[in-house]
Amino acid sequence: MSRGPGETLRLIRSGEATTRGELLAATGLSRVTVGKRLDLLLGSGIIREAGTGSATGGRRATTFVFDPAVVVLAAALDAVGGCVAVVSPHGEVIARHDIDTDVSQGPEVTLAIIGAGLTALMDEAGITVDSVAALAVSLPGPTDPVAHRLNDPPIMPGWDAWPVLDSLREILDVPGYVENDADAMAYGEASTEPDPTHPLVFVKTSAFLGAGLIIQGRIFRGLDGGAGDIGHVHVGGEAECRCGRAGCLAAEASGAALVSRLEHQGRGLTHIREIHDMIDRGDATAAAELRRAGELIGVVLATVVGVVNPAVIVVGGAMASPELVAAIRSSVYAGTLPRATRHLEIRSSRLGEDAALVGLARVAIDDLYSVESVNERLGTDE
Ligand SMILES: [Zn+2]
C-alpha cells in the first residue's frame, strides 16, 4: 500500500474515509500518524474541515474534504473555434470565453491565441497567477500519451510532434497537460456517471469524428494515442477523406461530409450545427442525411461495443441531437447481440460544450493530487 499523506488524501477524495475515526480504521495506522498526515494536508490547504459527519458513540466527528484553493486553466480546441475557461478543482466551470481559432493556422498562431484568451479571462474573473495549479489543452488530433505531442494529426498541418507543453509553459509556468479532444470529453462526461469507473465511450460528432474511451476509470489512449480514432474506419463509399483515402467513416458521416452532401442537394449551410434548425423547419432531406450519418456511425460503434462492452455511449459535438442518438442506437442494436446491449445506455452528452473543459480539469487535478504527487510534495512520514 502507498504510504504517506497521499494515501490519506486518496481515502478522503474517494469518500472511503472522511473522518479521523474512519481513517484510523481504514489504514490501521496510529492516531499520531493519522494526525500528522491530516496536519500536513490541512497545512498545505489541500483539505479543510467541513463540519460534522456521522455520529460515532454519541459524538459527531469532523469530516475532511478535498478543497484546494486553486483553479485549472483549460483550453478546448475544435478544428475551427474553441474556448478557454477557468475550472475549479471539482470540475465547475467558473468562467469561459469562446476563442476564434483555426488549428490549420499552425501551433504558433493557435497557441498565441490561447495565451491571449486565457490572460483576458483571468483578468476578467479576477484570477491571480499563483492560484493557477495547471494549464490543460485539448486538441482535435491523436495525442501521444508519453511525449504529450500530437502524433501525425490528419487535419493539423505543422502540429506533428510540436512541443505543445513547452509552448504552454511560455504562456504560464505551471504543470501542463495535452489531451485529445474526444478523450477529454469522455473523461469529463464520465464524472457525471453514477459510477465513473464503468467503461464509457464518448463519440464526438462534429466537423470531424472521433471517440474517447474510459476504461477502469481512466482514459484509454492506446499505444501512441490513436485509440478511439474511429473516423478512418472503412465503411465503403466513394467520398474522399481528408486522410487521402476513400470510404472512411469521416468521409461519409462527419459534419464536414454532411455539409458537403447537403450542398450537393442545394442546401447551403456554413456550419454543421445549422442542420438542426433545418430539420426543425421540416427539411426532410437534412433529416434523412443526419439519420444516415447516425446509422453509419452506429455500424462502427457496434464493433466498439463488441470489443469494449461499455456501460454507456455518450454522443456529443455539434451534430448531436435526439434524432442522431436514436439513429445511432438503432444501428448499434441491429449490429450487436442483445446480450451486449442489455445494460448499455446510449445518450446525449450531459455537459455539452463544457465536457472537454471538465475532463481537462479532472486530468490535471487527478495527476497533481495523486498519491505519488502528494507524497512527493509533502514527504512521506515512514
Ligand atoms: Zn480517412
Image (cartoon, helix red, strand yellow):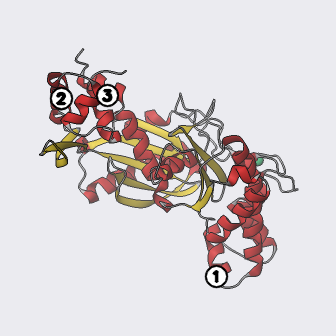
Looking at the picture, how far across and down is residue 210, in whole percent? 65, 50
Residue holding disc 3: 7
Q: Amino acid at mark 3?
A: Glu
Q: CA distance from mark 1 to mark 3?
A: 53 Å
SS class, disc 2: helix
Ranked by sequence position, the earlier of labels 3 and 2 is 3
SS class, disc 3: helix
Image point (41%, 48%), residue name = 74
Image point (53%, 28%), residue name = 147
Considering depth in this image, is 6 or 204 the residue closer to the camera? 6
Q: CA distance from mark 2 to mark 1?
A: 57 Å
Residue 45: name its quadrant: top left
Q: Residues within 10 Å of mark 2 (few under 14, many from 20)?
A: some
Q: Quadrant of the N terminus?
A: top left
In this view, the residue farthest toward the bottom is 281
Considering depth in this image, is 265 or 316 the residue closer to the camera? 316
Image point (52%, 41%), residue name = 179
- Of the residues tagged 1 and 3, which is closer to the observer? 3
Q: Look at the numbered disc 1 and say if its residue's Cβ is closer than 8 Å to ligand 1.
A: no
Q: Amino acid at mark 2?
A: Leu
Residue holding disc 1: 280
Instruction: Decide if residue 257 is on the left or right side of residue 181.
Output: right
Q: Amino acid at mark 1?
A: Asp
Ranked by sequence position, the earlier of labels 2 and 1 is 2
Residue 171: name its quadrant: top left
Q: CA distance from mark 3 to mark 2?
A: 12 Å
Q: Residues within 10 Å of mark 1 (few under 14, many from 20)?
A: few
